[in-house]
Image: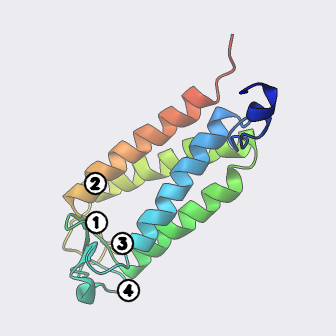
Amino acid sequence: MFGPMAHSRARPNPADGKAPVRRAAAVVAVLFVVIGVLGFVPGVTNPVDDLRLAGHHSGAALFDTFQVSVLHNLVHLGFGVAGLVLSRTVTRARTYLVGGGAVYLVLWLYGVVMDADSGANFLPLNGADNWLHLGLGLGMIGLGLVTARRPG
């Protein structure tokens, strides 16, 4: 009753045969796209009326925690779209994760040394953003290195 016929009707898993580094890059990329979109959604970003184009004067916070601006949200969207494109090959997926992780570590360092109330805070960044960027940087580099390893 549940022989080969039942199994042959099962839908194939789209991740079958995809290298782990490609899957990891695609998941990270989708998360960036989602976060970029959520940065414009009232109730998720508060107060959305305080969302500014750029700079530390943007009073909007994603999840009431991470200071965002239109530019900040667009960077997340662009980074996510780039990741989706780069996740199509193993080499580019690894480059996206490791290179993108390095970019986030630089962004973390920038946020730590830069005065949050200065004009140099153009994205804008706050303490929560800085910790998130450190975690993203380390996590993306780790994913890029661990998932790209060849078995054996």
Q: CA distance from mark 2 to mark 3?
A: 12 Å
Q: Residue furthest top?
A: 152
- Quarter of the image for residue 13 reads top right
Residue 11 coordinates in the image, percent (x, y) = 72, 44
Decide which of 112, 75 is in the foreground and name it.
Answer: 75
Q: Would you say 43 lies left or right of 103 here?
A: left
Find out whether the residues at labels 2 and 1 contact each other: C-beta distance under 8 Å.
yes
Q: Note whether 1 is above or below 115 in the view shown.
A: above
Q: Which residue is mark 2?
A: 130
- Which residue shows up at 51% across the image and 64% down it? 33
Position of residue 34 relative to residue 1, above or below, is below
Disc 1 to disc 3, C-alpha distance = 6 Å
In the picture of the structure, the residue carrying the numbered disc 3 is 123
Q: Position of residue 64 (x, y in %)?
A: 19, 68
The residue that disc 4 covers is 53
User: Vertically, is 59 above or below 139?
Assistant: below
Q: Check disc 1 and report its element: helix, strand or loop.
A: loop
Give the alpha-carbon distance from disc 2 to disc 1, as whole Å. 7 Å
Name which of mark 4 and mark 2 comes first in the sequence: 4
- In what element is the residue under mark 4? loop
Binning the other alpha carbons within 10 Å of mark 2 as few (below 14), some (14 to 19) or many (20 upward) gives: many
Distance from label 4 to label 2 (Cα)?
Answer: 20 Å
- From mark 4 to mark 1, how far is it between C-alphas? 14 Å
Q: Are marks 1 and 3 in contact (CB under 8 Å)?
A: yes
Q: Which mark is residue 145?
A: none
Residue under pointer 1: 125
Q: Nearer the viewer, residue 120 or 79?
A: 79
Q: Position of residue 54 (x, y in %)?
A: 36, 81
Q: Earlier in the sequence, mark 2 or mark 3?
A: 3
- Viewer-side residue, 8 vs 146: 8
Amino acid of disc 4: Leu
